[in-house]
Amino acid sequence: MRVTSLVHDERSGGVRIQLDERPFGTIGAADVIELGLAEGRPVADATEAELVRRAETFSARVVALRMIAARALSSTEVLRRLLRKGHAKPASEAAVAALLGSGLINDQQFAQHYASTRSRRQRFGPRRLMADLRRMGVNEKVATAAVRDALEADGVDPRSVLREAAQKKARSLGGLDPQTARRRLRAYLLRRGFGGAEVSAVVKDAVPR
């Protein structure tokens, strides 16, 4: 088997390979150098197997880059999505590891940004933020630090967020009897990740008897 064509692919930034005049796949420019590929040069069986692995990894990496360009994602969520799209697990894991190594995926930054935006815009409490981040595959230690740092950096007091959320929701429950309004308000605030004792105190103030 012989390399018959190496063509730069502007869309992916890789190099399209032909072996024996048949399309083979696309790999990174660094892969071409590392594997010693050149037009007209023969390809050993071991090199062909490595080419398959690197082409699969490159394809997964291209898709992963499109994902994180569209929206911030945790490394675990990127891996999950690659697998759902049918990419092989070894290739998907290698692609994610490479993006983590280059800093293009950063779970700490992702978690801190998520905590910051959700606490301000949606009035989520610390427990909800932690639960969401864990569900998205963020390590618990990383999630805990991110929530703490985000709230401190933004000067967000969870108690103030809780009071604001309670007051806003209470206004929408004004047509209900106090008992029903308090029950619904309590359930709403608990879903948003605030502690039970804090919620009980705020509900009493927001919906007087």
Image (cartoon, rainbow, N blue to C red):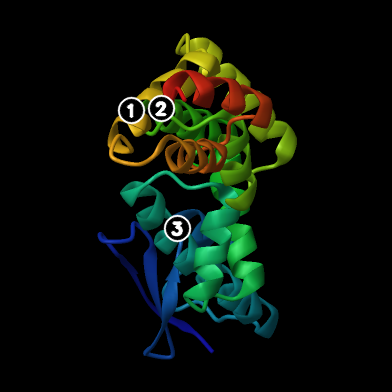
The residue under the point 61% across, 52% down is 135
Residue type at numbered disc 2: Ala
Q: Position of residue 183 (x, y in %)?
A: 51, 41
Residue 8 or residue 140, whichever sits in front: 140
Most extreme residue toward the left is 10
- Mark 2–mark 1 contact, CB under 8 Å? yes
Q: Position of residue 161 (x, y in %)?
A: 45, 20
Residue type at numbered disc 1: Lys
Q: Which residue is mark 3?
A: 64
Crowd class of label 2 (few under 14; some 14 to 19; many from 20; radius 10 Å)? many
Task: Give the distance between the C-alpha atoms of the residues marked 1 and 3, in whole angstroms.
Answer: 39 Å
SS state under label 2: helix
- Mark 1–mark 3 contact, CB under 8 Å? no
- Where on the picture, by quarter, is residue 201? top right
The residue under the point 58% across, 65% down is 92
Residue 60 or residue 16, whichever sits in front: 60
Crowd class of label 1 (few under 14; some 14 to 19; many from 20; radius 10 Å)? few
The residue under the point 54% across, 47% down is 74
Mark closer to the observer (3, 2): 2
Relative to residue 61, is residue 169 drawn left or right?
Answer: left
Task: Give the distance between the C-alpha atoms of the residues marked 2 and 1, in whole angstroms.
Answer: 5 Å
Residue type at numbered disc 3: Ala
Most extreme residue toward the top is 155
Among the two numbered marks 3 and 2 on one chain, the one whose residue lies closer to the N terminus: 3
Q: Which residue is mark 1?
A: 168
Among the two numbered marks 1 and 3 on one chain, the one whose residue lies closer to the N terminus: 3
Q: Which residue is mark 2?
A: 165
